[in-house]
Image (cartoon, rainbow, N blue to C red):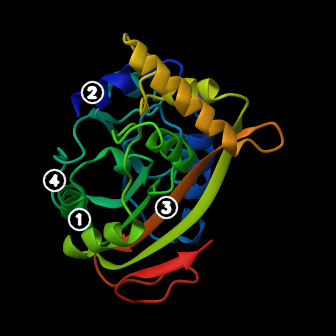
Amino acid sequence: MSAVRSAFNKASNDYDDHAFLQKEIASRLDNKLEVITKNAQVILDLGAGTGLLSKNLLKRFPDSQLVCLDFAQNSLKNNQSNNKICANANHLPLADNSVDIVVSSLMMQWCPDLKQLFSEIHRVLKNDGLVLFSTFGPDTLKELKKSWSVVDNETHVNTFIDMHDIGDQMLGAGFQSPVMEMETLTLTYQTVTDLLRDLKAIGAQTVSTRSKSLMGKDKFKLMMQMYESYRTNDKLPATYEVIYGHAWTQSSTPLKGEKQSSIKVQSI
């Protein structure tokens, strides 16, 4: 966890310049709040970082108190919100039943213990409170994973959790009728190196681009050669499986198009 925090701290100053995908997903997550008529006194932006989502939330809920929480202090320094807390999401320094809405964009994939995370979110939410989030699914960076898999059996790319497993963790934490959605977004690059630079620039250092050994350099070269098999229209694709989820602390009025069930999976 300290390595992840360090990576995000280092990337904080240039993060927004490279976070095209993150900005787009934050915007799409914010749009899902259009159907919320709930009177929210306190909103928690969990994993707020530099404020890609925070800016939208401030505009959407101008009369609410927005609390921005992140474990990377340098990222928070670049967040323009007034209420900022540097803390671990698994141990929220907030009182029980004190938050109306928890919104989190692309933070949960960095949390190794989702059971603890959702338990904490459930604890701080008020009765009839809402959690709404986005995260990455297992098919994220599948081209990079497959290219590395030809080279060796080591883990070079982060592993992401299936949305059904996320829904199960939410149910276990006490949330009612989680609703999960998924969509696939694809970025294109001229070279594999361009992709890896983007990942490093946003703190997602899934792959080491440096190697002191000849064997390491040969493996890296072979991986890049394998990635070339995905080239289409002179571009290399990088696939992202984006998962959106929401649930209430108690049975509540469904969001538009939602049906009450144990776990509802919707397509976008």
Give the distance between the C-alpha atoms of the residues marked 3 and 2, in whole angstroms.
24 Å
Q: According to the image, label 3 marks what residue?
A: 243
Q: Name the N-terminal-most of marks 1 and 4.
A: 4
Q: Are marks 1 and 4 in contact (CB under 8 Å)?
A: no
Q: Are marks 2 and 4 in contact (CB under 8 Å)?
A: no
Name the residue type under label 2. Ala
Q: Residues within 10 Å of mark 4 (few under 14, many from 20)?
A: few
The part of the image, by quadrant, that contains residue 123 is: bottom left
Q: According to the image, label 1 marks what residue?
A: 122
Q: Name the N-terminal-most of marks 2 and 4.
A: 2
Q: Residues within 10 Å of mark 3 (few under 14, many from 20)?
A: many
Give the distance between the C-alpha atoms of the residues marked 2 and 1, in whole angstroms.
27 Å
**Relative height, residue 112 to residue 123 (above, below):** above
- Label 1, secondary structure: give it: helix
Q: Position of residue 21 (x, y in %)?
A: 61, 42
Label at residue 254: none
Q: Are marks 1 and 3 in contact (CB under 8 Å)?
A: no
Q: Name the N-terminal-most of marks 2 and 1.
A: 2
Q: Residues within 10 Å of mark 1 (few under 14, many from 20)?
A: many
The C terminus appears in which quarter of the rendering?
bottom right
Name the residue type under label 4. Ala
**Relative height, residue 63 to residue 171 (above, below):** above
- Label 2, secondary structure: give it: helix
Horizontal arrangement in the rendering, residue 121 relative to residue 187 (left or right): left
Q: According to the image, label 2 marks what residue?
A: 3
Q: Name the N-terminal-most of marks 4 and 3.
A: 4
**Which of the two discs, 1 and 4, sits closer to the camera?**
1
User: Residue at the location (53% across, 39% down)?
Assistant: 52
Give the distance between the C-alpha atoms of the residues marked 2 and 4, in whole angstroms.
28 Å
